[in-house]
Amino acid sequence: MTGRCCLCGAVGQVERHHVTGRLVRGGDYVDPALVIELCTACHTGRAGLHPALRAAGLDFPRPGVDLLGFRCRRLGVTERLIGAAGGVLVLGPASAIATGDLVCALADARAPRARGVA
Ligand SMILES: [Zn+2]
Ligand SMILES: [Zn+2]
């Protein structure tokens, strides 16, 4: 698959990174539609996103952890890393919707409001 790496901006071969990850190694993705494109080096390389998430303790959610908070933290840490690297966060339509739904779910958990309002 070709595209543009969100972290380094290189155009060429990219891989899909699932921003909110999986519950367990080899398990299903928590938010399958929420993906960004990264080159292999920026994805799983030594200085890539996965080692950074691992270092931040965000590889997989610990048992009993609040999953909504975990997903939002992975999104936030990912966005910070992309910005700090001078990258550009590019979300396709499905990823943008999934991101919006995730942030709204957090907002609803913090400040419930009447349903049926956009
Ligand atoms: Zn890259
Ligand atoms: Zn990944």
Image: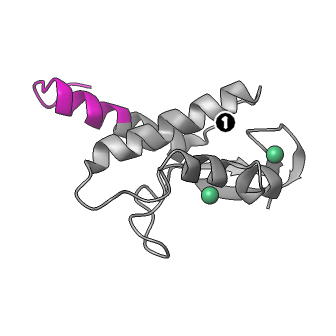
Name the side, left or right, on which 28 lies relative to 83.
left
Which stretch appears magenta?
103-118
Residue 89 seen by the camera: no
Q: Identify the residue at horizontal 53%, vertical 36% (top origin).
A: 77
- Quadrant for residue 17, please give it: bottom right
Q: Name the residue furthest bottom.
A: 26
Q: Identify the residue at horizontal 41%, vertical 70% (top origin).
A: 24
Q: Residues within 10 Å of mark 1 (few under 14, many from 20)?
A: some
Quadrant holding the N terminus: bottom right
Q: Position of residue 110 (x, y in %)?
A: 19, 27
Q: Position of residue 12 (x, y in %)?
A: 89, 52
Instruction: Say if the magenta span includes residue 110.
Output: yes
Name the side, left or right, on which 102 lies relative to 64.
right
The residue to which callout 1 is attached is 90
Q: Position of residue 50 (x, y in %)?
A: 63, 54
Q: Position of residue 44 (x, y in %)?
A: 72, 59
Q: Quadrant of ligand 1?
A: top right
| Amino acid type of the residue that numbered disc 1 sits on in the rendered structure | Val
- Quadrant for residue 60, please give it: bottom left
Q: Nearer the viewer, residue 44 or 54?
A: 54
Name the side, left or right, on which 39 lies relative to 36.
right
